[in-house]
Image (cartoon, helix red, strand yellow):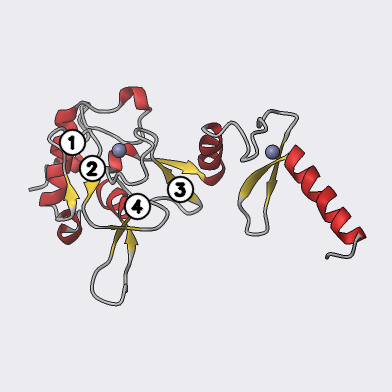
Amino acid sequence: MTNSPLLSTSADAWDPRLPRSCVNPISQLTRLYHTALHLGAADPHMMAKVVLPKDLEKCWEWSGAFFSNGYARYTRGRHHVGTQRVHIMLYEQLIGPVPPGMTLDHFRCNRKCCVNPYHLEVVTNLENIQRYYATITHCPAGHEYNKENTRYFVDGRGYNVRTCRICSRRHTQRHRIKKMVGLV
Ligand SMILES: [Zn+2]
Ligand SMILES: [Zn+2]
């Protein structure tokens, strides 16, 4: 059969690259999912641990193990050889490869544990961290992350991070005092 719905070019075919406002009616999602399974695009061993909701547009729960950072973990075979992040694998199997240097963001549900690939969007690392930061408005000591009090920089590992200026100033002062009295 050459007329695979996955490869369909008809006007109603859902393209994940379309803007969110154009994103799919459920019938297309259902069709896409079943088609993917029939084509063997999704790993059946992994799919066996996915708890699919009746409405496939809702979050897909994972009945297997999780990484300590909250993402679903899948291990095939013993000794943790081939341990994978499920959300990335499912995205790549059902939608397409994640381009190098890009990352996946749970833009629909903001739940790390969800493995519905249609809840994910490819973003740059910087975009992802900025979205995360947007949800945290104050530093652990309670100072607001406003324009004056926030410093953005790239740390030693190449990650984009931010700090609270008040806290880092206090940290420096404490360090200076400790140095003066010979504690460091
Ligand atoms: Zn979700
Ligand atoms: Zn602070």
* Contact, mark 3 vs mark 2 (Cβ under 8 Å): no
Residue at (51%, 38%) from the top-left corner? 132
| Image coordinates for residue 167, horizontal then vertical, percent | 73, 42
Q: Is residue 97 left or right of residue 10?
A: right
Q: Which mark is residue 25?
A: none
N-term mark: 3 or 2: 2
Determine if the C-beta at disc 2 is less than 8 A from ligand 1: yes
Secondary structure at badge 4 equals helix
Whole-Å distance between the Cαs marked 2 and 1?
Answer: 8 Å
The outermost residue toward the top is: 21
Q: Examine the image and state in which quarter residue 13 appears.
A: top left
| Image coordinates for residue 116, horizontal then vertical, percent | 27, 42
The relative height of residue 145 versus residue 35 in the rendered view (above or below) is above
Q: Which mark is residue 103?
A: 3
If the picture is divided into quarters, which one holds ligand 1? top left
The residue that disc 4 covers is: 88
The residue that disc 1 covers is: 56
Mark 2 vs mark 1: in front = 2
Q: Which mark is residue 60?
A: 2
Whole-Å distance between the Cαs marked 3 and 4?
Answer: 9 Å
Q: Is residue 46 left or right of residue 2?
A: right
Secondary structure at badge 3 equals strand
Q: Amino acid under label 4?
A: Ile
N-term mark: 1 or 3: 1
The outermost residue toward the bottom is: 79
Q: Amino acid under label 1?
A: Leu
